[in-house]
Image: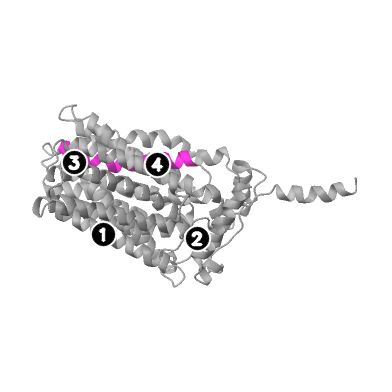
């Protein structure tokens, strides 16, 4: 009997060592999620507050439809630049340096908004804020993806969607609550966006670098130290797995035959999703007023509340259905809602609000995929660059649409604008139906070009198998 004891203990000891991507959920993961979601909440708040603040500042800053469009789209234009530049930097120099300090700069710029005396000054500050938001969009998705255990990745990353929607909705409620605070109410609205950024800053300063990035850049010992200290000694650190070319010319790699389909899907689905999201969301009260809805601010509150409810519902289903089904279905429903709003001219106000609510809820639910699906399309060495490029592409569309919406509503009417939104959403659904791969349950280590899903074009089939295996392991 004693002779058998050592034989039995060896497999038992080996079984205690978990693969990095299959690590058990630990308190550290919750800490990283909070540090990330707090920043994303700040992002949503910073973008959401501008719509209602501009409505309150129109007379003091002598804002025209043109200047309203410029101010509404300035942050999105800055976000384009920030995301585009941050991706390659974060892939080359690491996620932590940007992740740790961008909230400090964001809070400083938010405070400066209180002191502006002209639309031009506010335009410059809003553009810089957009740049900082772009940096956070990239590093938050990449860092949390690379820390999250595979089995929980969808739900953990889905919390970012709730955080963003919560910030966006909280901004609207905050602005609505401050509307009676006199002529300077809009200043206090804009100043309030500094609060969440300052609150989350201390937690971000203590965040370590991504072990996956460290391992890929020759810092195996540091990666092991982060894993063993933060996650546990029973978890094996990740191993180096670089792409050919040691990570150089990342944008060229994104458009190589290996990755260009995923790059195209990422850019298209994100762009088609955010164009109506920001165009309608930023000026929802103005759009409802153009549709002859009395109490348009109340309708806007309902709309924004449904953004939050939709984000929560999206989190509940993101790991229960395939990514493709979620994408295609959400595009179809939101496109139909916009089309009905544009064509049904005799629809009463409650019906208009109901369709807007359905649009907001479903679109917000599907925004979970921006945080879940987008990082799953790219390997570690290209993840930040791929995310940054997709965000940049989406912000071209959203900035242009936010700039044009108040002008178009005044010139051709709200219903024509909603028709354009319906077409954009239908285009996104069509592209996903034809090209979008399935990634649910896929290991991040499987996203290398030498692996079967990419080398032989069987991403969807392999990921489904991986998903089934993950569920079987979870059941055990």
Quarter of image, res 259: bottom left
Mark closest to the chain's N terminus, 1 or 3: 3
Query: In this orientation, which residue lies closer to the viewer: 456 or 200?
Result: 456
Residue 471 locus on image (x, y percent): 57, 51
Front of the two marks 1 and 2: 1
Mark closest to the chain's N terminus, 2 or 4: 4
Which class describes the residues within 10 Å of circle 3: few (<14), some (14-19), or many (20+)? many
Badge 3 is on which residue? 285
Badge 4 is on which residue? 312
Query: In this orientation, which residue lies closer to the viewer: 66 or 208?
Result: 66
Q: Secondary structure at mark 1?
A: helix
Residue 42 on the magenta segment = yes
Which class describes the residues within 10 Å of circle 1: few (<14), some (14-19), or many (20+)? many
The residue located at (41%, 63%) in the rendering is: 436
The residue located at (11%, 42%) in the rendering is: 292
Left or right: residue 61 compared with residue 51? left
Mark closest to the chain's N terminus, 1 or 4: 4
What is the number of callouts on the image? 4
Mark closest to the chain's N terminus, 3 or 4: 3
Residue stretch in magenta: 33-57
Task: Specify the label residue 381 is tagged with.
Answer: 2
Residue 218 on the magenta segment = no
Quarter of image, res 255: bottom left
């Amino acid at each position: 009997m004693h002779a058998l004891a050592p034989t039995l203990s060896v497999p038992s000891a080996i079984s205690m060592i978990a693969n990095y991507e299959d690590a058990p959920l630990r308190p550290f993961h919750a800490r990283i999620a909070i540090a990330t979601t707090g920043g994303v909440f700040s992002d949503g708040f910073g973008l959401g507050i501008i719509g209602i603040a501009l409505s309150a500042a129109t007379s003091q800053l002598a804002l025209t439809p043109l200047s309203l469009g410029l101010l509404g789209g300035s942050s999105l234009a800055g976000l384009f630049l920030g995301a585009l530049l941050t991706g390659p930097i974060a892939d080359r120099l690491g996620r932590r340096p940007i992740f740790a300090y961008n909230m400090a700069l964001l809070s400083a710029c938010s405070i400066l908004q209180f002191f502006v005396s002209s639309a031009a000054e506010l335009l410059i500050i809003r553009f810089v804020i957009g740049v900082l938001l772009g940096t956070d969009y990239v590093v938050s998705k990449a860092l949390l993806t690379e820390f999250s255990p595979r089995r929980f990745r969808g739900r953990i990353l889905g919390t970012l969607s709730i955080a963003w929607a919560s910030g966006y909705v909280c901004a609207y409620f905050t602005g609505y609550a401050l509307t009676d605070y006199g002529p300077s109410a809009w200043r206090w609205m804009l100043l309030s966006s500094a609060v969440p950024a300052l609150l989350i800053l201390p937690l971000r300063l203590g965040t370590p670098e991504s072990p996956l990035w460290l391992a890929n850049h020759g810092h195996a010992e540091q990666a092991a130290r982060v894993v063993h200290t933060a996650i546990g000694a029973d978890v094996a650190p990740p191993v180096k797995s670089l792409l050919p070319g040691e990570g150089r010319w990342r944008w060229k790699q994104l458009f190589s035959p290996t990755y260009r389909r995923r790059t195209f899907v990422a850019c298209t689905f994100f762009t088609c999703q955010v164009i109506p999201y920001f165009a309608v969301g930023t000026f929802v009260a103005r759009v409802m007023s153009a549709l002859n809805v009395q109490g348009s601010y109340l309708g806007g509150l309902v709309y924004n509340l449904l953004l939050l409810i939709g984000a929560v519902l999206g989190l509940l289903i993101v790991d229960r259905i395939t990514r493709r089904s979620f994408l295609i279905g959400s595009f179809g429903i939101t496109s139909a809602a916009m089309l009905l709003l544009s064509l049904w001219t005799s629809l009463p106000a409650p019906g208009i609000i109901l369709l807007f609510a359905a649009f907001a809820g479903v679109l917000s639910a599907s925004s979970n995929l921006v945080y879940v699906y987008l990082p799953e399309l790219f390997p570690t060495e290209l993840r930040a660059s791929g995310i940054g490029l997709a965000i940049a592409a989406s912000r071209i569309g959203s900035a242009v649409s936010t700039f044009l919406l108040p002008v178009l509503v005044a010139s051709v009417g709200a219903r024509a604008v909603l028709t354009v939104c319906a077409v954009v959403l239908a285009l996104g659904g069509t592209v996903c139906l034809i090209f979008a791969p399935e990634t649910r349950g896929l290991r991040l280590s499987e996203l290398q070009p030498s692996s079967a899903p990419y080398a032989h074009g069987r991403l969807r089939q392999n990921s489904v198998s991986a998903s089934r295996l993950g569920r079987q392991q979870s059941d055990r």
